[in-house]
Every structure is written in structure tokens, then in C-alpha cells.
Amino acid sequence: RWIKFEEKVEDGGERWSAPHVPALPLHSLFQLRTCLQKGTMLLDLDAPSFKEIINKVLSGLPEEADLQPELKERLAALLLRQPRHQPTKSLLQLLAELSLFPCRGRHGAQPWLQLLHPECPAAASLSFQLRNQFKKKVPPGAEAAHIAVGEVEFLEKLFAAFIRLQRGVALGSLAEVALPSRFLFILLGPRAKVKAYHEVGRAMAMLLTDELFQRVARQAEHREDLIAGMEEFLDQLTVLPPGKWDPSARIPPPSCLPSPHRRTTMHPLDRQSHGNGDTAAAGDRASLGHLCSREELERTGRLFGGLLRDIRRKAPWYSRDFSDALHPQCLSAVLYIYLATVTNAITFGGMLGDATTNMQGVLESFLGTAFAGSIFCLFSGQPLTILSSTGPVLVFERLLFSFSQDHSLDYLEFRLWIGLWVAFFGVVLVATEASHLVRYFTRFTEEGFCALISLIFIYDSLKKMLSLADAFPINWQYRLDNVTSYSCVCNLSSPGNDTLLPSPLAPWQVQPLLLGGWTRGWGGPEVSMRDTSSPPALSPQPPAAPARLSRTQCLGRGGHLLGTSCQYVPDVTLISFLLFGGTFLSCTTLKSFRSSRYFPAGVRKLVSDFAIILAILASCAVDAALGLETPKLLVPSELKPTNPARGWIVFPFGSNPWWVCLASMVPAVLVTILIFMDQQITAVILNRREYKLQKGAGFHLDLLCVSLLMVVTSATGLPWYVSSTVISLAHMESLRKESATLAPGKHPEFLGIREQRLTGLAVFILMGVSVFMAPILKHIPMPVLYGVFLHMGVAALNSIQLTDRVQLLLMPAKHQPDLAYLRHVPLRRVHLFTIIQLLCLALLWVLKSTMAAIIFPVMV
């Protein structure tokens, strides 16, 4: 049987093979062409049943067919016999039916049509069609084609017929599933040529599954049209030499197939060209220039013309932006991005607090993210964008605070005027359609920016994990045999006589190992690190035996160990790294579970959609089961400014001189460039053509929203926000749509992104109420969230072509994959381009690590 690729019944007749690309002898195609030229052909036959079709075929035979009436009757009776199909059965069904259905088809019968003897049950009845689960794999709107081939003893000549019905007709149980039928091909002949008939039938099946030949077969008016379509098929045929491959080997289906449009537009010589030609390279470069002809970036020549065009483009979709979010996949995206945004807000909030003496802290980061993100999702042109604080903004805040301190200026008031000027400049950029410059951003710029931000995420997650070794130090000098020196007491007790041998370092004290302020023994109570004044209550008498006994000596003299640290093993850092690595590997593995071979497609899709949440829940369950005091997620629990010296409103005229409002224009220009570049580069990456977005972009509208939000966040002393590249890419990846109905062997087809506003809005609303969710969030270990951060960084890094080209640097030529650009660009030029990109990336990394990081978007 065929849907997209061929499937065969394996030896034994109880299971279908894996789908594979059919391989045919070339001679079978020539024989098929002869059958179509000389056999019976009925086009647009009007017949409501299979019996009437057979009667019209036999009654319309030409005189040269020379079939006697009795032969026609025998032929009709043979063709009208009840077919038996090969269903897909589970192991239990096979065992149950082994004794119930002793009648089996002849070994070697054709899978597309098998003829039963009258005494066998009709396994392909209409009830079987209704129960057949195979129909789920058939694409909607599909029609069936039936091919019957075989040898009969009463025929002396070949009988071939090709029938095209005027309209699709349900032919009862002739098909494996209930589908309308359009084409039929019958080939019967004398004995001793069954192998040749078999291959001709396969050739016709392969032709009818070809989309271009289907068009010809549906539109053909004469026999010559059908023959011409077959000749075109033969022109595109690729022949494999017989001595260079195994004909019995099954070729697996490719991951992607050329579209029919591409096959019709490409010249055969172009299809075979694999050189480094300039024409092909130019076509590849043209496909990469995905923003050069976009309507969103065309200038109108009017003030706010681009903004008005963005509004007109997005307004018709606004109601659907909420209804399209009613899908379980969106719930997974909300939870995933919420946890990522919470972690990011805590990280940047803590660094802002350190840089500004808590003038902006974690609570301000939470409230600012919730407010700015919600407004942006409601009114922006690309609501899939996630706003966040970024590294360059953090560097500017640090420099601005230091400048204010050195010159006795009010930091928040100075910052307010800068924010107002930035908002004004942003509105001017929107009015003059400055976003038009985005079309000059090349893939080189996009990949450099995305790679840098991805590496920052990876670096920060690893840095945070390594810092745990300082908060929870590992006792590298710990030796199990010297456990008595770690506040552990050897008890050489006997009935009526207790002798304690304490550690010589702290006699008569239980002094646990210093580890973050406390420790807990195995099964013992928590012991304060700062209370070492309480004497043990085990013996009022000093020891009368030597004090320096090791664990081995103590146990050898019949004693046993007492103390809270006797069984201590430094494990907090270790389990944190295990949770970190386990979460990252779980996210990566479960995310790719969609393409796994295990479980039904629905289960795989569900697991892949909720991969991040399942990984987080599993890691939290492991942490809770072990009961170790790993560092947990802590969010603010009170709605008050982090620094009590400030309020929620910043007044423009306070302690600063009057000229500050004018002088702030200078740093505002730098911040405007920073915001514009950071925002628009991220917008370009998110609006690539390969994401197949249907609702259009809104570069001008997004920039206006970010500019106006600067006014509110500056007036309230909240952090400034711009698009976060990595989190936004993770948001889009969590909303990928793929085809649900798949033909056997066909890989899932990427359909686009689930474009809507509700997931981002829900994420930022949850950010706002996180203050009231502290009792729940405190059970999430921070290493788990750092593992999610690492996954996001790696996923974003793998989404760019730079990663593939870096891998090519380390691959011998014979092991390099067959990439499109390698066919058209010399390898040395690919390597040169990659090395230049890596050098620029290294320069940006060095720049980011210095105080000059504020100009890093300009350098990009």
C-alpha cells in the first residue's frame, strides 16, 4: 500500500513494513507504458459501484481483445470476489486470532489486493473499515486508487485496463479504509510472469502517488496526455547502477522533499548541478535576504505612516489573538516562560540592587516586568516578544548611579529626565519611520547578536552554579576515617559505665562543620552553627581514656559514634549540580520526544509540548524526596520599595539643579541608540520568514510601545525594559505548530507559530501576583531554574547557522553533511566567513565584559 511511501507486508503476513522509498526495475516502467498504450482506457467513467465499473470495462473491450463471453464472465467473477486487507494488529490480537482464523492468503499475495476463497470470512467488511485506526494517518480530502495485478490460468493474453471515474465513488470494502475512489488499474495475464506483473503494479502505484502525475491523470482527455505525463515522470527519474547498491535495501524516507512547484520550475540540468556556481549562490543569497522585500519595512513618506500601517495590519487579527490561544500547548508555554522570566527578574533585580544600593531591587524588577510586559502584550505589533532587563541597560544603570554619586545628584530624578528624553527620541524615530533601516540588518548581524546573547545565558547559568561552591563549600579534606575530628564523639560505653571520648579540637562541645550557617545530620535534628556553648548531656565526667581515636580504632575497641556530624557528607553542592544537569538533559530529551519511536503520536506530542514543565516537576520531586536544603527560589513577599529612602513616584523637579533636565539629553541619545538596536535586532530575528508568521510584524508599533513604557518606568523608578532575545525565541519555540495528520514515513511538517497575545499576558500577570505565591515558589530549587536557563541558551544557539558552520571547522570533508550552501560556496570561503564571525563575536564578548558594554549594540 502507498500513502506517500511504500509499505509491504512482511514475510509471515502479519505486519506492515516500515515506510520506504520504492525502488523499481526500469524495465517495469517501460512495460507499464506499453500497457497504457495498448490496454483499455476509460476516462471520466460514470459508474456508482465496482460491479458496474467491471461490467462497463468488459463490455467496452475492443475486438482485438478476443475475449469469449465465458472468459468475460469468469474474469468478472474473479475481480468481484471479496478482497482481504492486511490490518495492523497488536500482539494480543494476533494471539487471539491465531486459532480463530485459520484461513490465510497465499504466501506472496499482493498487499494492495488479495482475493479470498469463498469459504474465508470477509475481513475487509464495512465494519472493519469503521474500526480501522489506519484512517487517522490518511490526510483529509484524500482519495483511493486501486491496483489489481495477478496471473490467471484461463487467460492467454495480457488484460490491462486503466479507469478514471468522473467523480470519487465509495466502492464498499474495496479500500482498506472508507475513502472515495477515483482511479483503478487492472493487470491480469497468463501464468509464469507473476513477478513482472507485480513490478508493473508497483510502478503504477508509484506513479499515482506522485503529485505531478496525479495532476496529469486528473486532467488528461486522451490516452496521449497520460503517456506524455509518464514521459515527463521518466525525464525526472534517477537511475541507480545495479552493482553499486543492494536492491533489497529499503531506502528510508527523507526528512524533507522538494515541492511540486520547485520540480516544475527547475530545469533538469539545474537539478543536477552541484558545483560552486555563482547563479546558485546568488539564489541562495536571495533566499537569505528575508527582510529585503517585506511590506512592513517599506517607507510611506508620511509622518507616522509606518505606525498607521502597522495598526491597520494588526487590528483585524486582534480578536483572534486571544481565541487562537485556546490550546493546551499555550498552557505549557505560559508555565515555561513564567519560570524563565521569574528567574531572569530575580537575577537582574539582584544585580540592579547591588549596583544602585537597592534604589532598584528584586521587587521593582518584578513589578516593572509585570507592568511593562502586560502593556506590551496588549498593544504591541509582535506580542510573542518577551520584555526583560538586558546587560547593556544594567551597565548604563551602574555608570549613571556612579556618576550621580560622584556629582551629588539625585539618581532617580536624573534617570527620570533621561527616560523622558529617550521616550521623546523614540517617538521621533517612529514618526520618521527609522525602523526602515532594519532591512539593512544582515544574517551576519543577526547571528552575531543571537550567539552573543545565547552565550551570555549559558555563561551566567554556569557561573551561578559555580558560585554555589562558595555558599555551600565542599569539604575537600573530609576523610571518612577521621570522622571523629568533625564534632563526633566516640562512646566506649558499657552497662553502668559511660566513657565519652570527644574530639580534642572541641572537648565537651558539639561543633558541626560550618556549611552556610547550619548542618543537619543523617536523620538527626538541625543544629545551630553559632551555638557551641551547650555541653553534651551524655556524661558528667571527663573522659578517662585517650582522646585521639579514629573511627576505625573506636569501632575496633567496641565503641560507637555519637554526634550530629558523624554521618555527614558534603552533598548540597553535588546535588545542586545533579539537579542542574538533570534538568538540562531532561528538557533537551523530552523536547525531542516528538520525533521518538516510542508511544503513539498524541502522547509524544503532549510530552514534547510540556517538556520543560515535566522536567522541572521531576527535578523538584527528586529534591523534595532527598530532603536536602538546596538553595530555593525566593521572591519578595511585601509590596514596598527595596530601599526605604525612596517612594513609588519620582518627581522631576527636586534636589537636582535645573540644568540637569537639559544635560540629560546627552546620555539619552546613547540610551536611545541602545534601545533601538537591541529592540529591532531582536524583532528581526523573531520575524524571520522561516517561522511562517501569518499575522505580520509591527516594527514601528513595537518601538512606540517600548518608548512610551520608558515614561512610566522612569516616573515610578522601575527598571527599563527591552526585548529579550533568548526568552522570546524560547517563547516562539514553545508555540511551534506541526502537522497532526501524517502519512506513514512522512516527517511532521512545520506549520508555523501559534500567534496570540494570551500566553505573554498570562506570564506577566503571574509575575505580578508572584509576591503572593512565595509559599509555593519557595519549593523550586534555583539549580533547576539555572538548568532551564542553560537549555534556553543552548536551544537558541542551535537555532542559528553559525553553530553548524563552527562544527564544519572540526569535521573532515567526507563527514560533512550535505548542506545547501556547501553545494554553491567553496568550503574555504565558508570557513573564512565563520572565522571572521567568531572573531567579531570574541570582540563583542570582550567589549561586553568592560565598562564600554553600553555601546555594544552599536558595535553589533
Image: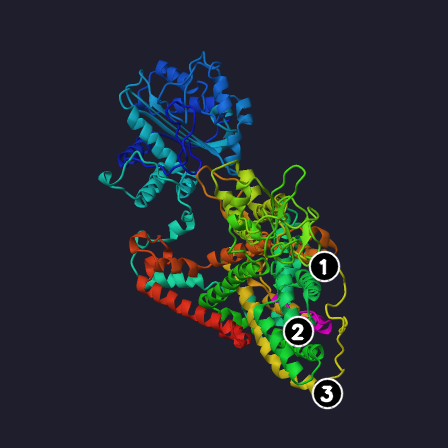
Mark 1 lies on a secondary structure that is helix
Q: Residue at x 66, y 50 (%)?
A: 542
* Span shown in magenta: 710-722
Residue highlighted by disc 1: 768
Crowding at dot 3, Cα within 10 Å, few <14 / some 14-19 / many 20+, comes out as few
Nearest to N terminus: mark 2 or mark 1: 2
Q: How many marks?
A: 3
Q: Return the residue nearer the eye: 340 or 798.
A: 340
Mark 2 lies on a secondary structure that is loop
Q: Inspect the magenta stretch and tell me whether residue 654 lies in it.
A: no
Corner quadrant of residue 9: top left
> Alpha carbon of mark 3 to alpha carbon of mark 2: how far?
23 Å
Crowding at dot 1, Cα within 10 Å, few <14 / some 14-19 / many 20+, comes out as some
Residue 329 lies, in percent from the top left, at 61, 47
Q: Which mark is residue 356?
A: 2
Image height of 29 relative to 176, above or below: below
Residue 244 lies, in percent from the top left, at 24, 41
Nearest to N terminus: mark 3 or mark 1: 3
Residue highlighted by disc 3: 658
Q: Inspect the magenta stretch and tell me whether residue 721 lies in it.
A: yes
Q: Nearer the viewer, mark 3 or mark 2?
A: 2
Q: Nearer the viewer, mark 2 or mark 1?
A: 2
> Alpha carbon of mark 3 to alpha carbon of mark 1: how far?
36 Å
Q: Return the residue nearer the eye: 627 or 215.
A: 627
Corner quadrant of residue 197: top left
